[in-house]
Image: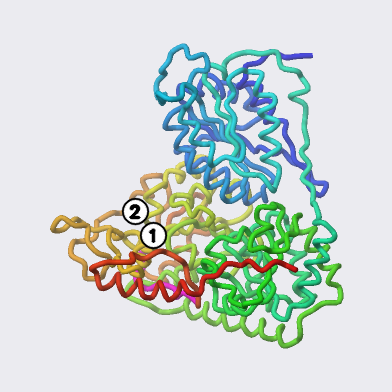
Amino acid sequence: MTVRLTMAQALVRFLANQYVERDGEEQRFFAGCFGIFGHGNVAGVGQALLEYEDDLTYYQSRNEQAMVHTATAYARQKNRLQTFACTSSIGPGATNMVTGAALATINRLPVLLLPGDVFASRGPDPVLQQLEAPHDGDLSVNDAFRPVSRYWDRINRPEQIIPAALAAMRVLTNPAETGAVTLALPQDVQAEAYDYPEEFFEKRVWRITRPVPDAAELERAAELIRDARRPMIVAGGGTIYSEATEALRAFTERTGIPVAETQAGKGSMPYDHPLALGAVGATGTFAANRAAREADVVIGVGTRWSDFTTASKTAFQNPHVRFVNVNVADLDAAKHAGIGLVGDARATLDALDVALASYEVDAACREESGKANAEWDAEVERLYTLGYGPLPAQSEVIGAVNSFSEPEDVVVCAAGSMPGDLHKLWRTRDPKGYHVEYGYSCMGYEIAGGLGVKMAAPERGVYVMVGDGSYLMMNAEIVTSIQEDKKLTIVLVDNSGFSSIGSLSRSVGAQGFGTQYRYRENGSIGLDTEDAPGDVLPVDLAQNAESLGAHVIRAKSVGELKGALAEAKGLNRTVVIHIAVDRYEGVPDYESFWDVPVAEVSGMESVGAAYDEYAKNRQSERRYLRGGD
């Protein structure tokens, strides 16, 4: 039996009937479809979403990049078991989604992108917004999605959607391959009819299994760990996505192996657990970084080993250090010449626990970890309560928000100086309470991402921590949060510019050039210093937020911030709390390094001094090439 539908109608009906199942729990994979319509999709996907609105809910957005961020944040909060589709018109609507696609793929999070495309028939050629390439008649702007998508296809005939949609689902639901999937949809083909087999629209359940590593590799890893004197675990995002936090805690408590966390893995352990060392790497704590320096075996669980995690390969300094990598993706399991335990994090930790049944670290190591945890927490408390003035320090703002949030609430951030400070200082109490996008560290993600978190977990409070630079790049989803009745508490931390890069610029000798929001003076934007010429721009971001429909509270001190946070809890719509902070009072780096090249030659004395320091630090970088044997 067949049913005659347009390609777009067939696609929408197919998406509405896709389900996933893990551990016996089944749910629909697509929570709906975000879209902004134009001539490239209004008569195709737009019409189909109207006709089948009861089957696949349509959500309106204000910016194509933002709607992809919202979908991606939703998928992360749902541990990759659910996501959204996102549709746009051709041209700028499509290319606006490329940044979102890159973010999803880098973070290994599923999202389906359905950009409109030029006419497959080449009838009205060139169509409005078409890219003409003299060397390639089949090229369109949607080819820009190829390098940032885990699967890409262009549907030039209506029947092609059948194999393409199935291939898309295979990738989206595969934890080892997932990321952005792009199906480019020529606008004429979207509206063309075809007799589709009814089986294509039947309920289809994609089962997400928990594979375990090869038994021989598991024994090799266990043997290596048994011989370790100072092992440690680095928990990444895969620990949380696979819901392995309880397995991790049981494993660490029995063995005594301490745990450090990446940005995506923060929350794998409660902050106050005596075996929790906190953040590791370039934005790490002294507790984790000291343990990393001495570790002889490092067990990475669900981490892709970014340069921030390894402090540009300076964190692990033991000359005999070996790596054991637990990861569902063999790409990540093979890094640092480690023993690759390719499998689900939870299932692999359980298997490793059995293989190491008689192993535990000595009592002195356990005691040392507990002491390090307590010392670090005392440092956090110090930074929470600096009493800095006249403008407060950013660490005090973080402390106030943390103290007013409930354990199950979620903090959301992505770019600037805030993610590094949060990684060090946020006291995580729930595995899903920390949501910092740091794979792409995309400015503008915060509010759109916060909306996705709130849509995925409406029972949780969502605190969006955003700097003024990121806020100015993408704030329009405040409107969407109000339209969808999804309350966000947005803490807008204003330091008059790009504070993080200002600090980085000063560290490389470039004196903060071009990073502060000031009037041009004598032909120059000027330097990022407290006595720089030119007035700070009179931008009123609080007034802007109010114009978008948010309830706005201005706080001028930490005390007023605490009052604003208390007031915000009693409000039922999105709140923006604006507070200015001192851009020069930062959280220290704790025995870590991040490789940002410094100009090797310069007539500037500040650059020469910075290069000397850089060259010295680079001497600690190493390649981890010792295998597990």
Secondary structure category for the residue under label 1: strand
Residue 582 visible in the picture: no
Q: Please tell me in which quadrant of the rendered image residue 206 appears.
A: top right
Q: Position of residue 598 (x, y in %)?
A: 36, 66
- Decide: is 360 above or below 348: below
190 or 66: nearer the eye? Answer: 190
Q: Position of residue 479 (x, y in %)?
A: 45, 42
Q: How many marks?
A: 2
Is 501 left, or right, of 406 in this rendering? left
Residue stretch in magenta: 578-590
User: Which disc number belongs to residue 297?
Assistant: none
Residue drawn at x 61%, y 32% is 57
Distance from Cα at disc 1 to Cα at disc 2: 8 Å
Residue 140 visible in the picture: yes
Q: Which image quarter is the C terminus in? A: bottom right
Amino acid type, label 2: Leu
| Residue 583 is covered by the magenta coloring | yes
Q: Which image quarter is the N terminus in? A: top right
Q: Position of residue 120 (x, y in %)?
A: 52, 17
* Residues packed near mark 1 inside 10 Å, few (<14), some (14 to 19) or many (20 plus): many
Q: Earlier in the sequence, mark 1 or mark 2?
A: 2
38 or 181: nearer the eye? Answer: 181
Residue carrying label 1: 578
User: Which disc number belongs to residue 541?
Assistant: 2
Secondary structure category for the residue under label 2: helix
| Residue 307 is covered by the magenta coloring | no
- Decide: is 559 above or below 160: below
Is 257 left, or right, of 74 in this rendering? right
Amino acid type, label 1: His
Q: Position of residue 129 (x, y in %)?
A: 40, 25
Q: Are marks 1 and 2 in contact (CB under 8 Å)?
A: yes
